[in-house]
Amino acid sequence: MTLDIEEIKLSEKLQKMYKEFLIYVEQENVEFERTESKKLELQLKEKIQWLKRYLVHLEKGGKRIQAGADYWAQHQNHKLIIEYGEDEQGNIDQEILFLWCETCSDIVSSHIKKSDGNREFEKIKNHLGHEISPVREVQNNKKICLTCNHCMDNPLILCNEMSEWFNEI
């Protein structure tokens, strides 16, 4: 069994960071509206719980989470939206698209136009500003699809298979 020490260290660091921020939010909630503070606390607790489960998986010799379907699956039942990304100076960059989770205030995936043969970019760009849902296929529980809640005729955007170990986490 080979442990992914680099990913374990990163996960531990993220977990510590989220825990410290959670403590800050709980103690300093006067700076936030109470409802916003509670929402942020729940977001942080969810992230910490996810990282705990992922860390246990890694410590057992498990593989790293893969970009795409594994990240989509983490955000099932969350409100996602497609937005333009920003460059290093914070300016809107129309050649970068983010799948943004409004529930977690987190980037789920990013897509760059410059990538050769990046059909995903064009498929996603057609749904800019739309609310997106990650939905598991009924027939194949390992397959997850991004569907657009605004498009009635053709709501399917992308589908991909999650890592085999994903359900273990």
Image (cartoon, rainbow, N blue to C red):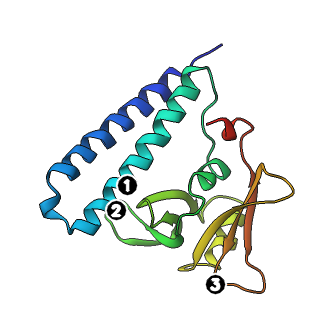
How far is mark 2 from mark 1, CA to CA?
Answer: 5 Å
Residue 150 numbered mark, or none: 3
Residue visible at 38% across and 47% down in the picture? 45
Residue farthest along the top direction in this orientation = 1
Q: Are marks 2 and 1 in contact (CB under 8 Å)?
A: yes
Task: Report helix, strand or loop for mark 1.
Answer: helix
Q: Image height check: is 97 above or below 53?
A: below
User: Where does residue 99 sit, x and y in percent of width and height?
Assistant: 54, 65
**Residue at (53, 57) in percent of width and height:** 108
What crowding class fits label 3: few (fewer than 14 Cα within 10 Å), some (14-19), or many (20 or more)? few
- Circle 2 residues within 10 Å: few <14, some 14–19, many ≥20: some
**Which quadrant of the figure has residue 14?**
top left
Give the x, y percent position of residue 121: 64, 67
* Element under disc 3: loop
The amino acid at mark 2 is: Lys
Identify the residue position indicated by label 2 in the image: 39
The residue at 42%/26% (across/down) is 9
Q: For this view, does 107 lie left or right of residue 32?
A: right
Q: Secondary structure at mark 2?
A: helix
- The quadrant the N terminus occupies is top right
Give the class, few, some or many, for how many residues have Cα within 10 Å of label 1's Cα (few <14, many ≥20).
Answer: some
Foreground of the two, 106 or 46: 46
What amino acid is found at the position of numbered circle 1 in the picture? Answer: Leu
The quadrant the C terminus occupies is: top right
Query: Where on the picture, by quarter, is residue 138?
Result: bottom right
Residue 24 vertical position relative to residue 106 in the rendered view, above or below: above
Give the residue displayed 40% in from the left and 30% down from the top. Answer: 12
Which residue corresponds to mark 1?
Answer: 42
Position of residue 10 relative to residue 30, above or below, is above
| Comes first in the chain, label 3 or label 2 | 2
